[in-house]
Image: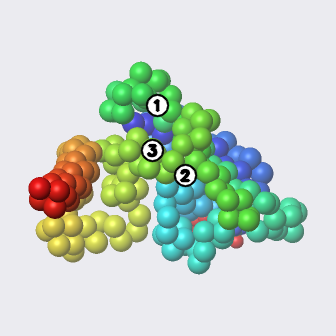
């Protein structure tokens, strides 16, 4: 799944709407210190559902909203959209046939937030499911920041295995298995309860 475009507005140093196109081949974001290069990566992490303000180099999630500069007043809303080219990598059947998929996240200063897929409201869970096994999900190896290679090498074998599973595309199936086992457990408890009632009635 290839990132085609990123649209950032009111997010960190991006007061006004900025559109970044990522054409085929190698792309680099260059600029002087403090101009907002890392904020681009933060925007990608955030729109894909990052829940930790620390991972976004802030204290609270509200810190991602543009908080004003000499030339601009603070904004009341941060919005980031990411557009993917779907080269057959999306396994979710409802999106499998679409050539492009746009994921959007918004956060208002009053704390309200929402997510969209192709401009339709959705849950964070839908985005997580969409990204599962693409390398952009929870155990995203698509973003390799400073220190990540060292932490991978130093991690415990069980942790490393999770990365390999994501790369191998089996995270989705492991999750489905976990959910099915949970449902089976619920059904088993219901059966036990039913059995007790039958004994009581008899
Ligand atoms: P370097 O090359 O030094 O690593 P960089 O280009 O990666 O820098 P960033 O870390 O992306 O720069 O951006 C830092 C800038 O973003 C700072 O000027 C900071 O004030 C600004 N910034 C961060 N959060 C906000 C915010 N919520 N509102 C306005 N500006 C912000």
Closer-to-camera residue (18/191):
191
Q: Nearer the viewer, mark 2 or mark 3?
A: 3
Closer-to-camera residue (177/163):
177
- Residue ID at (60%, 74%): 60
Q: Nearer the viewer, mark 1 or mark 3?
A: 3
Rendered position, 120 above or below 151: above
Q: Quadrant of ligand 1?
A: bottom right
Label 2 CA crowd tier, 10 Å (few <14, some 14–19, many 20+): many
Q: Nearer the viewer, mark 2 or mark 1?
A: 2
Q: Residue 98 placed where, x, y %?
A: 46, 24
Q: CA distance from mark 2 to mark 1?
A: 16 Å
Residue 141, image quadrant: bottom left
Closer-to-camera residue (115/71):
115
Q: Which residue is mark 2?
A: 47
Is mark 1 in CB contact (under 8 Å) with mark 3?
no
Whether residue 41 appears in this view of the structure is: no
Query: Callout 3: helix, strand or loop?
Result: helix
Q: Is residue 193 left or right of residue 144?
A: left
Q: Earlier in the sequence, mark 2 or mark 1?
A: 2
- The label on residue 126 is 3
Is mark 2 in CB contact (under 8 Å) with mark 3?
no
Q: In the rendered view of the protein, which quadrant contains the N terminus?
A: top left
Q: Which residue is mark 1?
A: 85
Q: Is residue 74 left or right of residue 192?
A: right
Label 3 CA crowd tier, 10 Å (few <14, some 14–19, many 20+): some
Whether residue 113 appears in this view of the structure is: yes
Question: Number of callouts in the render?
Answer: 3
- Residue ID at (60%, 61%): 39
């Amino acid at each position: 799944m290839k990132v085609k475009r990123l649209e950032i507005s009111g997010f960190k140093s991006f007061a006004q709407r900025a559109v970044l196109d990522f054409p085929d081949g190698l792309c680099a974001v260059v600029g002087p210190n403090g101009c907002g290069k890392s904020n681009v990566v933060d925007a990608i992490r955030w729109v894909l559902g990052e829940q930790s303000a620390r991972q976004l180099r802030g204290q609270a999630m509200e810190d991602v909203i543009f908080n004003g500069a000499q030339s601009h007043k603070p904004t009341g809303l941060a919005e980031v959209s990411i557009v993917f080219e779907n080269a057959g990598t999306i396994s979710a059947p409802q999106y499998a046939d679409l050539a492009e998929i746009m994921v959007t996240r918004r956060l208002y200063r009053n704390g309200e937030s929402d997510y969209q897929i192709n401009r339709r409201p959705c849950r964070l869970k839908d985005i997580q499911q969409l990204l599962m096994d693409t390398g952009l999900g929870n155990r995203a190896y698509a973003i390799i920041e400073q220190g990540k290679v060292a932490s991978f090498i130093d991690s415990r074998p069980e942790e490393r295995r999770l990365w390999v599973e994501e790369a191998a595309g089996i995270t989705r199936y492991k999750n489905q298995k976990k959910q099915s086992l949970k449902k089976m457990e619920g059904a088993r408890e219901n059966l036990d309860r039913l059995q007790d009632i039958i004994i009581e009635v008899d």
